Amino acid sequence: MKKRLLSIVGIAVFTLSLCACQSSNTSTQSSDLSATETDTVSADTSIPDSETLYQVSLLQGLTLGDYYGSITVAELKEHGDIGLGTFNALNGEMIVLDGEVYRAAGDGSVEVVDDNETIPFSDVTFFDEDEIMELKDVSTFDDLTAILDEKVDELGTNRFYVIRIDATFDEINVRSEYAQEEPYEPLATVLETDQTFYDYEECDGTIVGLYCPEYMSDLNATGWHLHFVSSDRTKGGHVLGMKFTDATLAIDYTDGFNMQLPDTSMFRDFDLTIDQSKDIEKVEKNTD
């Protein structure tokens, strides 16, 4: 810029009219550039945020029995096109895939959920495929998480990871639960009586998964949390086990985190300092 000004001043010594012309052109170009830059910035604000995990409430609130929906399905879709969670009154398992929100219900059915239904807990992001790899000969849940954990060790243990696994599953074992009635019981208590299990064979479908780092232990379940929906959208649930020969794994690593807390008296009065690690492990893995 200094060189530009010196050039203009030098020209002015010889001809004032030429200086005025140069100044006018420079001003016009600057004005046009500013308008272009402004348009670019405005356009960028409409791009979906694919680098942030958006979480509704804490899993620890859900495990204590807060099943009251705090945002709508329509609002959730504004923050992501892939993820998992549950619905008001704990009415089934949520699978978000390719921008659609599905419910795997306690009776084993799967349905597209209305935009007006509310959500007490969920994690979503806009899927941005950062890496893809093939998986071979996985026989158990632990087999799969061992492979996934090895990838986490390679890419960094303090990031969030959202994955999708597409395969024909030799076996897929899932669970869901029935909608609850008030007064709500803690989640571990509910699952003692109101969860249902389904085992499917030779089933095409997709596992949607979330990895949370260890420092998230007071906000979510750490490690891997997996939900499933079949390709024909008739089967699904929270994944407890699987077996497959070949699968495609797509990974989205995400470094941003945004959490929306529910504005309810129940949530405000919770003692969230209570250690819920055993209940969370029981809920996630169906352990005794």
Image (cartoon, rainbow, N blue to C red):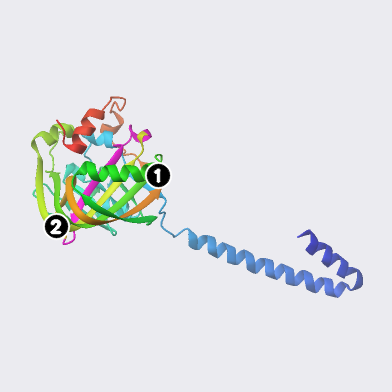
- Label 2 crowd (10 A; few <14 / some 14-19 / many >=20): some
**Residue 65 falls inside the magenta stretch:** no
Mark 1 vs mark 2, foreground winner is: 1
- Element type at mark 1: helix
Is 166 rendered above or below residue 150? below
In the rendered image, which quarter is residue 191 located in?
Answer: top left
Quarter of the image where the C terminus is located: top left
In the picture of the structure, the residue carrying the numbered disc 1 is 154
Give the residue type at disc 1.
Glu
Disc with the residue nearer the chain's start (1 vs 2): 1
Viewer-proximal residue among 217 and 170: 170
Mark identifier at residue 203: 2
User: What residue is drawn where x is 35% and y is 56%?
Assistant: 132
The span picked out in magenta is 215-232
Viewer-proximal residue among 234 and 91: 234
Viewer-proximal residue among 51 and 73: 51
Q: In the rendering, at what x and y percent does residue 249 appear?
A: 30, 54
Query: Viewed as shown, does residue 193 lie left or right of 275?
Result: left
Give the residue type at disc 2.
Cys
Looking at this rendering, what residue extends furthest in the right direction?
A: 14
In the rendered image, which quarter is residue 274 located in?
Answer: top left
User: What residue is drawn where x is 18% and y is 47%?
Assistant: 139
